[in-house]
């Protein structure tokens, strides 16, 4: 039995007993507007390793909540704690109840790793998981939802990695859950398949399903999530809407200026002076030399013309310009201290600017 089945049957697949923090009834008074997921001070250790080190998390009804963080940050452990497939300390409530007390019909879980119970076709596998619930959707439309209708009769083991993952997503939604945990749903899925999973998540969310999504694909999380929490070393270091996080931690938009070789400091200084004198009138323009040329920081789209004027005034001949705005990936790299250094072309450990731990 895997974690999907474990969640569906409230089973303790790892043989752990229910957690001590469950109250006598295991249930809080819950209303329609109550948070769907609450974690307060959640802790879980494996020997010396504090996988979760006091996590606070709250997911509102109908939200797509993204959980991001480096390998080993504790994402899967948090999903397992919230789905009752592992024991953890602290307050954990799902629909007002302790995770192991929640009606399994309401929960869908796509675990990070999935082992089918036996040799089955894609269709039989979805049937199998559907059979674990009091009520389940028909298998055919579920397989259609994940783009697997044409391969319904193929043995699971003969499917490609991406097709297997899509079939797993089908097993997680066969019970039409109110809360869907997706632990890295698109790993190994090709761009078209990813797009179809994205559309599925958007449609489920549009129909009111609450989605708890962990992913390493920042574009995916930025596109899908209403709010995002960044987990680092077992603790949440930032939480907010993608736009808010980008505004707060993403840095400024910038203009990459490609020259026919690296710029020297004199070029950078000339451009800086020209920008200070020009219409943009920036007091201390952030101009730095890069391996490809120059980067001018803080350039808004309407200021690109001024930057070009400044380059010309400084006598810097450029080959091309590329403007980019910060993304959730920049937030991630800054807050995890894994910022990309274009100068060296390598990732390097820098002091994370979200260092509130
Ligand atoms: N069953 C286990 N036994 C021992 N240590 C574990 C176990 N599960 C997780 N850990 C450790 O707990 C920490 C958090 O692991 P977890 O799998 O939750 O991270 P993650 O953020 O999901 O990582 P990834 O992005 O690689 O999936 C890691 O240091 C991991 O080695």
Image (cartoon, grey):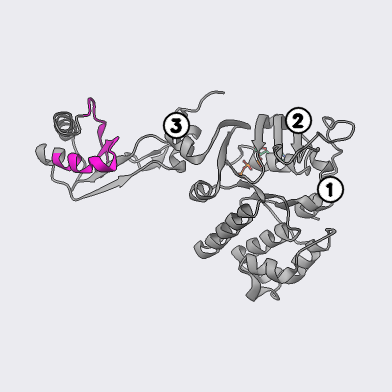
**Residue 28 at least partly seen:** yes
Dot 3 lies on which element? helix
Q: Considering only vertical position in the picture, is 112 above or below 166? A: above
Q: Considering only vertical position in the picture, is 18 above or below 182? A: above
Q: Quadrant of ligand 1?
A: top right
Q: Nearer the viewer, residue 119 or 249?
A: 249
Q: Quadrant of residue 316?
A: top left
Q: Ligand 1: does it lie within 8 Å of the C-beta at label 3? A: no
Q: Could you tell me which quadrant the C terminus lies in?
A: top right
Question: Of the numbered discs in the image, which one, if any, rests on residue 91?
Answer: 2
Dot 1 lies on which element? loop
Residue reaching furthest front? 32
Indicate yes or no whether the magenta region holds residue 224.
Answer: no
Residue neighbourhood size for the residue with mark 2, other residues' Cα within 10 Å, grouped as few (<14), some (14–19), many (≥20)? some
Say whether marks 1 and 3 touch (CB < 8 Å).
no
Q: CA distance from mark 2 to mark 1?
A: 18 Å
Q: Quadrant of residue 356?
A: top right
347 left or right of 237? left
Dot 2 lies on which element? strand
> What residue appears at the point 50 percent right and 28 percent down from the top-left corner?
354
Residues rendered magenta in the picture? 282-309
> What residue appears at the point 75 percent right and 34 percent down from the top-left corner?
92
Residue receiving disc 1: 10
Question: Of the numbered discs in the image, which one, if any, rests on residue 196?
Answer: none
Can you give x and y, in whole percent of width and height, for residue 41 in the image?
70, 27
Q: CA distance from mark 3 to mark 2?
A: 29 Å
Q: CA distance from mark 1 to mark 3?
A: 40 Å
Q: Quadrant of residue 75?
A: top right
Residue receiving disc 3: 248
Q: Considering only vertical position in the picture, is 309 above or below 40? A: below
């Amino acid at each position: 039995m895997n974690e999907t089945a474990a969640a569906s049957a409230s089973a303790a697949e790892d043989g752990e007993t229910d957690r001590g923090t469950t109250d006598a009834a295991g249930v809080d008074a819950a209303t329609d507007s109550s948070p769907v997921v609450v974690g307060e001070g959640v802790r879980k250790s494996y020997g010396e390793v504090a996988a979760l080190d006091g996590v606070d998390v709250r997911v509102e009804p109908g939200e797509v909540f993204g959980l991001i963080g480096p390998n080993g940050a504790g994402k899967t452990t948090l999903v397992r704690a919230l789905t009752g497939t592992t024991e953890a300390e602290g307050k954990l409530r799902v629909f007002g109840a302790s995770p192991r007390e929640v009606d399994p019909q309401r929960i869908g879980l796509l675990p990070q790793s999935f082992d089918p119970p036996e040799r089955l076709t894609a269709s039989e596998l979805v049937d199998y998981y559907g059979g674990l619930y009091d009520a389940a959707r028909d298998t055919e439309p579920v397989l259609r939802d994940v783009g697997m209708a044409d391969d319904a009769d193929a043995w699971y083991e003969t499917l490609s990695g991406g097709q297997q993952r899509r079939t797993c997503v089908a097993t997680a939604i066969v019970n039409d859950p109110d809360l869907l945990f997706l632990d890295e749903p698109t790993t190994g899925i090709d761009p078209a398949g990813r797009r179809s999973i994205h559309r599925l998540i958007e449609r489920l969310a549009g129909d009111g399903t609450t989605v708890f999504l962990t992913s390493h694909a920042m574009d995916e999380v930025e596109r899908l999530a209403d709010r995002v929490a960044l987990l680092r070393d077992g603790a949440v270091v930032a939480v907010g809407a993608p736009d808010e996080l980008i505004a707060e931690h993403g840095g400024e938009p910038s203009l990459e200026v490609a020259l026919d070789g690296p710029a020297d400091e004199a070029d950078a200084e000339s451009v800086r002076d020209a920008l200070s004198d020009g219409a943009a009138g920036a007091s201390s323009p952030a101009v730095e030399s890069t391996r490809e040329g120059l980067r001018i920081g803080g350039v808004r789209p309407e200021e690109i013309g001024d930057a070009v004027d400044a380059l010309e005034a400084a006598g810097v001949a450029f080959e091309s310009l590329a403007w980019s705005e910060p993304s959730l990936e920049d937030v991630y790299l800054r807050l995890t201290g894994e910022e990309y250094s274009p100068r060296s072309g390598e990732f390097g450990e820098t002091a994370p600017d979200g260092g509130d731990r």
